[in-house]
Amino acid sequence: MNRTEFIVVTAIILFVAFALGWFAYWLLHRFTRVSQADMGELERMAQALHEAEETRDQAIAYIQDREAELSNQIAQTEAELRAAMDGLRDARHEAEEMRTYIEKVNAT
């Protein structure tokens, strides 16, 4: 095989490889093409996802606000309970002192 034949054979092989690659690309592109209906569906799904994320964010914000409000109410209720218990303790102590005083006065 001389130099000219080698160049021609190499050129044919390269052209066939190019043609096969181009055909494979065209075939792949043909089967994986996204239609307008699919694009519309993807757009609707993206919009629904965006709305769901916004709703989730709003729900999280509401839950956090509500949790802070309830924690504040619990703290206030516990403070009121402590004050009531202190008042009750003082009243019991005072009642005990009064009983002791009355018993002392009745004894004499």
Image (spheres, grey):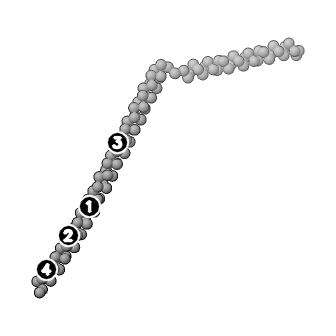
CB atoms of marks 2 and 4 within 8 Å: no
Judging by the rendered image, the residue that carries numbered circle 3 is: 62
Q: Inspect the image, locate mark 1, and give the three-letter code of the amino acid beneath it.
A: Leu
Q: Disc 2 residue type?
A: Ala
- Between marks 4 and 1 in the image, the one whose residue lies nearer the viewer: 4
Residue at image coords 29%, 59%: 78
Picture residue at 66% right of the left edge, 18% below the top: 22
Q: Which residue is mark 1?
A: 81
Disc 2 or 1, which lies upstream in sequence?
A: 1
Identity of the residue drawn at 47% across and 22% down: 39
Q: Residue furthest bottom?
A: 108
- For the residues bearing labels 1 and 3, Cβ distance under 8 angstroms: no
Q: Are marks 2 and 1 in contact (CB under 8 Å)?
A: no
| Residue closer to the observer: 59 or 40 | 59
Residue name at image x 58 percent, y 20 percent: 29
Q: Marks 2 and 4, how far apart in space?
A: 16 Å
Residue that badge 4 annotates = 102
First of labels 3, 4 by sequence position: 3
Secondary element under disc 3, as helix, strand or loop, is helix
Q: Residues within 10 Å of mark 2 (few under 14, many from 20)?
A: few
The amino acid pointed to by label 3 is Tyr
Circle 1 Cα neighbour tier, 10 Å, few/some/many (<14 / 14–19 / ≥20) = few
- The residue mark sitting in front, 2 or 3, is 2
Mark 4 and mark 1: span between their CA atoms?
31 Å
Q: On the picture, is 17 further left or further right than 35?
A: right
Q: Between 40 and 57, which is closer to the camera in this rendering? A: 57
